[in-house]
């Protein structure tokens, strides 16, 4: 069977919170001033209480509101597809399946959480959301979701992606959002960065600082984050929950699950619904693929750190390259973040997820092969997951294992990146150890 579908009535009605199941748990966020666990009252200035309750929940299952389900039904359940033509091209006996999250209105998995976040903000009377975006996928998703719930949306887009991806801006404009290149002159922190680094390509850490400053300066505005935080991971578990039900329909089960890793939302979203099975002895591997130019899980430190450059966030216990880290302008803009989800970080700590880094040229080669065999052009971020799946499928061409990867987004708005790949303008870049040491030397002392 090429495509395994679920009926609308079979879409999950609850999100899964894996934190109670993680051995040795996930450490709480800390107040940067007191170094004590931070309660919801301080975070309520930038997040609605409904999301904060999810962020700190100890319940394994969280109901998906009917209003959120209605919007999700525009594209969910998403299809599980067997990449049999890719298998033939590789000459492998492995079965390769992908969960096609590129069918969402914004073209990526990000819309799953954007809809939920917009709903909870609207429910509590918020009028406007401020956010950041790297590659533009999250900004596009939140723009769509804000339009659905009649909220204003302002997006601080990392400068290098702002310049590289003009049609992402067009998509956000279509949904009614305002987009600003970050760092910008619209915030005090942005002005500081431009004064000291006028030619900077920007970073997600800088854009987060600007969006947080924006949200903190207006009574009608809250902040929305597209990855990393617990509640975002919970929302994305709908991917893995659906995939699990789809495999049950065909009487199969994955041996390996692969996801690309930037902040952690799509990888954790497809993996953690299978976590209990793994903990109970089921033989299944989780593989996280990140860029060699931003090797958070493979070379970063596991420590408390800020989520942004201006040090406006709580301290999160995660793998990090340091909040001062300014990444190179690789084309997988959604994978350029210095930190990693505390949930995914804890799974790596417990050796439940195996991280691996790959170079961008081999990822674009994998994306081209996937497009030629399966017909869908993947986003540069998704190319990393495809490369990871190919590595797994070709370790032993005679191994008939079943591989599942998250096709986190299509690349139809990333064709300028492919142009640069075909013209030879892209190079591999491995972040030097000495630069990582420099970036991590200012981690908070706890």
Image (cartoon, rainbow, N blue to C red):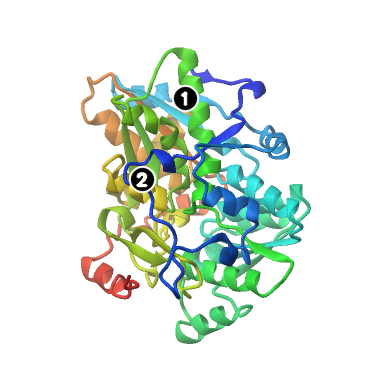
Residue at numbered disc 1? 244
* Quadrant placement of the C terminus: bottom left
Which of the two residues, 212 or 32, is positioned nearer the viewer here?
Answer: 32
Residue 48 position, x and y percent, is 65, 57
Residue at disc 2, secondary structure = helix
Residue 179 position, x and y percent, is 65, 64
Residue placed at 44% from the left, 60% from the top? 29
Residue 441 position, x and y percent, is 28, 74
Residue placed at 53% from the left, 48% from the top? 232
For residue 164, the mark is: none
In the image, residue 211 above or below residue 302: below
* 398 lies left or right of 82: left
Residue 30 position, x and y percent, is 43, 65
For residue 363, the mark is: 2
For label 1, the crowd category at 10 Å Cα-Cα, with few meaning under 14, some 14 to 19 and many 20 or more, is: some
Residue placed at 30% from the left, 60% from the top? 429
* 128 lies left or right of 19: right
In the image, residue 386 above or below residue 154: above
From where the camera sits, is residue 375 visible? no
In the image, residue 216 above or below residue 266: below
In the image, residue 10 above or below residue 130: above
* 385 lies left or right of 401: right
Residue placed at 46% from the left, 13% from the top? 250
Which of the two residues, 429 or 104, is positioned nearer the viewer here?
Answer: 104
Which of the two residues, 120 or 432, is positioned nearer the viewer here?
Answer: 120
């Amino acid at each position: 069977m090429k495509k395994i579908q679920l009926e609308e009535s079979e879409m999950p009605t609850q999100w899964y919170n894996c934190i109670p199941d993680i051995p040795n748990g996930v450490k709480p966020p800390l107040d940067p001033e007191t170094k004590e666990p931070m309660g919801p009252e301080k975070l309520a200035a930038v997040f609605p209480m409904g999301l904060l309750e999810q962020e700190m929940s100890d319940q394994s299952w969280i109901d998906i509101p009917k209003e959120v389900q209605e919007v999700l039904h525009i594209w969910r359940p998403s299809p599980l597809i067997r990449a049999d033509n890719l298998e033939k091209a590789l000459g492998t006996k492995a079965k390769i399946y992908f969960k096609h999250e590129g069918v969402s209105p914004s073209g990526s998995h990000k819309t799953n959480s954007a809809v939920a976040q917009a709903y909870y903000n609207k429910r509590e009377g918020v009028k406007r959301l401020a956010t950041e975006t790297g590659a533009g996928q999250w900004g596009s998703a939140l723009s769509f979701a804000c339009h659905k719930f009649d909220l204003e949306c302002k997006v601080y887009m990392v400068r290098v992606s702002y310049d590289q991806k003009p049609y992402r801006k067009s998509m956000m404009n279509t949904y009614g959002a305002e987009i600003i290149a970050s760092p910008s002159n619209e915030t005090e922190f942005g002005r500081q960065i431009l004064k000291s680094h006028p030619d900077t390509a920007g970073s997600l850490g800088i854009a987060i600082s600007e969006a947080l400053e924006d949200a903190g300066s207006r009574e009608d505005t809250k902040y929305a984050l597209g990855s990393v935080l617990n509640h975002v991971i919970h929302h994305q578990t709908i991917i893995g929950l659906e995939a699990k039900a789809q495999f049950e329909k065909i009487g199969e089960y994955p041996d390996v699950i692969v996801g690309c890793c930037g902040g952690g939302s799509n990888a954790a979203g497809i993996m953690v619904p299978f976590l209990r099975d793994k903990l109970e002895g089921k033989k299944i591997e989780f593989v996280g693929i990140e860029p060699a130019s931003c090797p958070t899980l493979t070379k970063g430190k596991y420590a408390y750190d800020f989520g942004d450059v201006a040090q406006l966030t709580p301290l999160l216990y995660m793998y990090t390259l340091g909040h001062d880290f300014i990444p190179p302008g690789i084309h997988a803009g959604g994978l350029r973040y210095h930190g990693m989800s505390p949930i995914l970080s804890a799974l790596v700590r417990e050796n439940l997820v195996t991280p691996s880094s790959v170079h961008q040229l081999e990822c674009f080669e994998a994306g081209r092969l996937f497009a030629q065999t399966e017909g869908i052009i993947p986003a540069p971020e998704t190319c990393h997951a495809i490369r990871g799946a190919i590595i797994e499928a070709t370790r032993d061409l005679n191994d008939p294992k079943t591989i599942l990867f998250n096709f986190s987004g299509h690349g139809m708005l990333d064709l300028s990146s492919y142009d640069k790949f075909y013209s030879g303008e892209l190079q591999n870049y491995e972040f030097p150890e000495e630069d990582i040491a420099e970036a991590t030397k200012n981690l908070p002392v706890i």
